[in-house]
Image (cartoon, grey):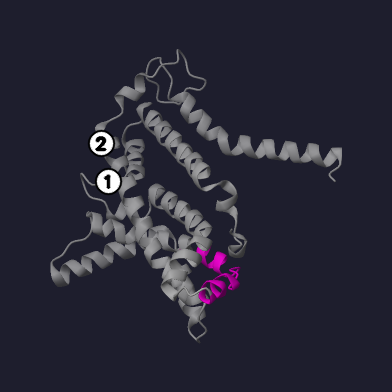
Amino acid sequence: MQTWTEKVILFVWCGFSYVFLLSPMVVVMGASLHGGEFSAAIKFPPDEPSFQWYSKIPTEQFEALALSLLVAAVATFIAALIAIPAALGLVRSNFKLKFAITSVFRAPLQIPAIVSGIAFLQLYYLIFDTSGLMLAGTIPGMLLGHVFIATPFLFGTIVAVLQRFDHRLEEASYSLGAGRWRTLYRVTLPTIMPGIYSGGLYAFMVSFADVPMSIFLTAPGFVTYPVELFYAMENDFDPSILASSSIVIVFCLAMLLVVQKVVGLETLLRSGGGSAR
């Protein structure tokens, strides 16, 4: 049982954490409602609250947002196709190079994203010099880079679930006459789904918010949303950037709530594969 003092300390600490994490978003969303004259500085609380800056969001930012959503969704799907069989194979195998291969899958987490971006750009130039195919500034080229940075998140969460997987579930399936593929589809995949969901969510967010990798792989007319905002902030700031950012904040929060509602927060956080019903 917690004492009264412990409860107060926990309440204060949690409150401070929420304020620390949410206050930047509150400031951005509040400043986007500024209805007065344009100011080079963020105005919070807003004067004469208005949605005028939402109607002045450049078309380029909406196009960049659509591109980022497309790239993040496809990259997460491809990363899942790579990470699921890789995690299953490595966790359930026993060979000398197992640790080395596992380290390779986790390597993108250790490499600075800007270094990865430069490496991919140089690789694309090398491919262009040898074959005439330029991948920089194209969707396939962008996807390759984003799959590279997204796969470790899926791989890591799936491995964590598989390491706690109750193999008696599969043995029971075999004893009832199910084959390997049917057991994989009806027992194994549903049981490790919490790891796939949580890893996929992290991978999507990382891909969607990436700047260091994307900034090297974009081209004029082909720019992701974070990079578009980066260029806009660098060249000419106006409150429409805050309005655009507020829309993305609301979208991300809504997506998290939908995932929590459909999947369940406990399912997303659960790492014990054998505890699934």
Q: Which residue is drawn at the image coordinates 41% and 47% (left, top)?
A: 209
Give the CA separation, mark 2 to mark 1.
9 Å
Which residue ends up furthest to the bottom in the rendered image?
Answer: 96
Q: Mark 2 or mark 1, which has the lower sequence index?
A: 2
Q: Which residue is drawn at the image coordinates 46% and 24% (left, top)?
A: 31
Left or right of 231 in this view: 106: right
**Which amino acid type is marked by label 2?**
Glu
Q: Which mark is residue 223?
A: 1
Residue occupied by mark 2: 60
Q: Nearer the viewer, residue 132 or 81?
A: 81
Q: Which residue is drawn at the image coordinates 54% and 72% (left, top)?
A: 170
Q: Residue 178 carries which label?
A: none
Q: Nearer the viewer, residue 137 or 88?
A: 88
Q: Main secondary structure of the magenta part?
A: helix
Left or right of 138 in this view: 252: right
Q: Residues within 10 Å of mark 1 (few under 14, many from 20)?
A: many
Left or right of 144 in this view: 163: right
Q: Which residue is drawn at the image coordinates 60% and 73% (left, top)?
A: 168
Residue 237: x and y, percent? 36, 31
Residue 173: in magenta span:
yes
Q: Which of 257 and 21 is in front in this view?
A: 257
**Which element carries disc 2, helix, strand or loop?**
helix
Query: Is residue 172 something one can see in this rendering?
Result: yes
Residue 101: x and y, percent? 46, 77
Kindly check if marks 2 and 1 are in contact, taking CB atoms under 8 A apart as contact. yes
Residue numbers of the magenta segment: 155-175
Q: Which of 171 and 235 is in front in this view?
A: 171
Which residue ends up furthest to the left in the rendered image?
Answer: 132
**Which element carries disc 1, helix, strand or loop?**
loop
Residue 166: in magenta span:
yes
Query: Is residue 238 something one can see in this rendering?
Result: no
Residue 228: x and y, percent? 31, 41
